[in-house]
Amino acid sequence: MPSADPHASARQASSEPGSWGHASAWAGTNIALVKYWGKRPGSMNLPAAGSLSLTLADLGTRTSVRFLSKAVSPDRPDEIWLNGAPADPAFARRTSLFLDRVRSLAGIDHAAHVVTENTIPTAAGLASSASGFAALATAASRAAGLALSPPELSRLARQGSGSAARSIFGGFVEMAAGTAESGEDAVAHQVLPPESWDLRLVVALTAKGAKAIGSTEAMTHTAATSPFFAAWIESVDHDLADARDALSKRDFGRLGRITERSCLRMHASAMASDPGILYWNPVTVAAIHELRALRSRGVGVYFTIDAGPHVKALCEAENAATVAQALASIPGVLETLIAHPGPGVSVIEQSMGATA
Ligand code: PMV
């Protein structure tokens, strides 16, 4: 049975015989303003183009990792918990594969006990893989006795999920595509800290349940079959340069226009696949029209949409309540929430000690 504090079991066990090292970390999720959509070939999970995002406060993942003194083996697999219950096989497998990278980096073979809690409301439709792999990279590397720098953590997190590389940093973050096959230069960095610009992302949930097709599969399918994929990738560098400039000048209208066109071009490339990938539902489209109508009435607001049907509206803090109200009034919008810029990943606790 999960205890009231599910991290307590991981924490407690670090001082018990058989425990080797323990750490826990928290990471906020992030929403891309200039989207990442497409990978380079190879096993290092390298992006085909750069991206730029905003890390969010409060909505994220807390992960505890405890390495045991026993070696990982088919008889002694990693124990993976997610939101108070044993994780499903797909999640557990992806987590264990990521732990293998950390074990190989640290030169250890210990099995792990991992407890992951998402602080993103269950049906929020916000990607938890970004904050999940950022928190896991940080907690697992610390628990393995490694003291990685933020760029090193970003490279490591990227191998779990491309967007996770950005959640290592707070505020506005740019991910470089890089060119090295090793992934050395495919790393994120902070462009502006969270407190430097008081923007809001208003999230409108338009459906319940998991997305139809995961981002990795959808990106691969888009790259393989969409005649628009090359044009999409070609457009990204210009959007990134434009976004950097808009950020440096705190030019909200310009950042908003870049955000919308990057979203629409990403989705256009996916829609033009064969068969086409369509993440939107009728409520998604209604929300787009509502936000554009609001804009024509003088409220500065721009949308972005990820690999799902939910709509995220970028606005200045003073307009967040108006935007949330307008989105909430659309039939079919299930819930709205107002998110604000947040910090990068943090280590909550750490203890080392081989006691076996
Ligand atoms: O990091 P992944 O593999 O979950 O891909 C993220 C893809 C988008 O969320 C659609 C865009 C982005 O840049 O976050």
Image: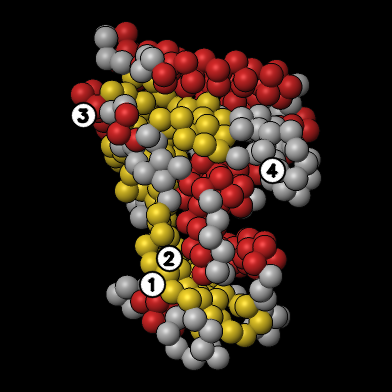
Mark 3 belongs to which amino acid?
Ala
Q: Which residue is drawn at 42% across and 85% down?
A: 15
Residue denoted by label 3: 321
Q: Do the residues labelled 2 and 1 touch (CB within 8 Å)?
A: yes
User: How many other residues sit within 10 Å of disc 2, few (<14), some (14-19) or many (≥20)?
Assistant: many
Q: Position of residue 180 (x, y in %)?
A: 75, 38
Mark 1 belongs to which amino acid?
His
Q: Is mark 4 on a helix, strand or loop?
A: loop
Marked residue nearer the N-terminal end (1 or 3): 1
Q: How far is mark 1 from mark 4, CA to CA?
A: 33 Å
Residue denoted by label 2: 24
Residue denoted by label 1: 7
In the image, is 215 to the left or to the right of 189? right
Does residue 212 appear anywhere in the picture?
Answer: no
Q: Which residue is drawn at 38% across and 67% down?
A: 349
Q: How far is mark 1 from mark 3, CA to CA?
A: 35 Å
